[in-house]
Amino acid sequence: MAGESEEAEFARGPQGAAVWSALGAASRSKADAFLDRQIALTEIQIEQLGQQEHFEHSHLRWRRFNDWMKGGLQILTLILGVAIVAGIGAVVWNASQVEGLVVDAFSVPPAFASAGVAGDVVADDLTNRIATIRDFANDNSLARSKDVSKDGDQDIKVEIPETGVSLAQAWRYLKQWLGHERRLNGNLRDSGAGRIALTVALDGRNAFILEGAAADLGKLEDQAAERVFAQVDPTNYVLYLNGKARDAESLAAAARLPRLAHTPAELADAYSLWANATRYVTGDLGLSTARARLSIAFDPKTTAGHMELMLTAAIQGHDEEALVEARQIAGKRKEDEPAWRNSDGVAYAKQQASGIRDSSSGDFQHALSQPCLYLCSVSTAALRRAEYAARLHDSLLSRALVADAVAAGSMDPVQRQRSRYFAAAAAQDWPAAVASARAYGSASHDGTAAARLRNLMAATRAAPLLAYALAQAGDFAAAHRAIDATPADCYQCLRMRGNVDALQKNRDGAQYWFARAVAAAPSLPAAYADWGTMLLAKGDAAGAGEKFAEAAKLA
């Protein structure tokens, strides 16, 4: 049966029967002795089985531990392999992303080296001079120039085993293979008779030689640094020259940019900067506009061409066109900007566009709330906000902001007089408004921009305000002299021609000019509001209501 013991099964088997038969034939003492030996043998076997079971358990535990160790080692090996691959990938990636300019030690005559002008000294001088130019250009630019450094790879001497190559050399070879660094080298020679020749080559080509007196080595290094920077970053070189007030050189450098461009985006950037230089240096706004339009045609996604077209249109008083471009800029993305992807250029353009949209729609409350973050001093930002506060008839805030501007120092004289004008107008202090408008016009004529540009800015910005203040003060003859000299396609000028006639109660003349202003800028509300005010004073409440409704819809 299934429940029987092994002893019972053994007893029924043939071996068991033989054992029992032998025991039955043997004496009692022999049988007892046999059983004692069997019992002892069985106990030994039981003990051995227990020890064997303990050994098996111990062996199984050790095998399990061994399996764990093997698995852990395999995991660690895998992790280490992944880390090594990731490390190599990171090194390769970093090498591929390396940019900028590296200045190698220059070759110099032994006499110069013994006098302290060794090759690394010349390299240090050029590095520092190029870095100074770069920093100045960056301060006057919305894009950022690449770094410049002296070659310091040889300062690291750790060797890679069995290769004889230092880690620095390996890193240098990797950067040269995958990166985008440009290297500058050259030599200094004694030309005799106290003269020297400095030879400089960028990337082993485009070498140039500068000669001069040995005492003028610093001047030669300055000239070399400028020429190198012009090759490394021709765009910011234009802005460097502009910041140094070297206008003719700046315009010539901008004119070379299209020839250096290789893609539509680069062409767009080149023509936008050329448009900027054309406007600023020559004052030829028609040509500046044409170049800005070329920039947009090459790559409509980029922002710079739209910004230049917007600013040029605003100076000319073409407010409708400026508003169209301002709305375009609002949707621009930094990701679409090859030149401004790593800078604040798009944000600056949007700041400029926001100011034009707010002024065009009369949303001075929004303009007042916006910070001026880019290429804007603390005093200028405060003065602009003071103007918006005055136009909202918040005289207390306007005065407080002017006080902030005074405390900040270095006030822009043009914006200061403009803010004063609107504060006086809000208080209906027309003599003070006339004085501020005249000062505004005079300040607009000053500065480093082309005289043609300054004259136009005075005509489209200051003269309309002066004419309106003179008319409000009752001096209509002077008001007409001021406004009649303004451009016939300037929106604010057309508005103020109408307002001068309206104040003089020449309502037919006023209606004519307001209609011209509305036709010039149908998206702007100001002329509609002026027209409604004139009709209301005339007693035409229904006509005034229509104009005010149109203004409200556009505001």
Image (tube, rainbow, N blue to C red):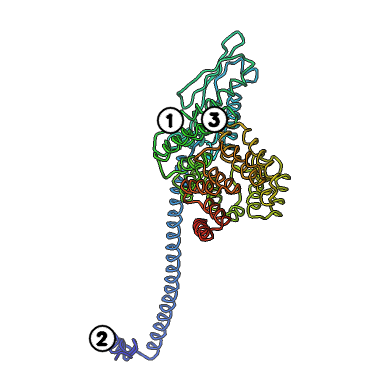
Q: Is residue 24 left or right of residue 119?
A: left
Residue under numbered circle 2: 14
Residue 261 falls in image quadrant: top left
Question: Which of the numbered marks, if any, corresponds to residue 406?
Answer: none
For badge 1, the amino acid type reads Leu
Question: Which of the numbered marks, if any, corresponds to residue 281?
Answer: 3
For badge 3, the amino acid type reads Val
Residue at image point 49% right, 42% down: 318
Q: In this view, does 368 lie to the left or right of 518?
A: right
Residue under numbered circle 1: 260
Return the disc, 3 or 2, that comes first in the chain's sequence: 2
**Can you give x and y, in whole percent of width and height, for residue 213 in the image?**
61, 13
Label 3 vs label 2: CA separation? 126 Å
For badge 2, the amino acid type reads Pro
SS assignment at label 1:
helix
Is label 3 or label 2 in front? 3
| View extreme (top): residue | 193
Q: Where does the N terminus fall, quadrant-wise?
A: bottom left
Return the disc, 1 or 2, that comes first in the chain's sequence: 2
381 and 386: which is toward the camera: 386
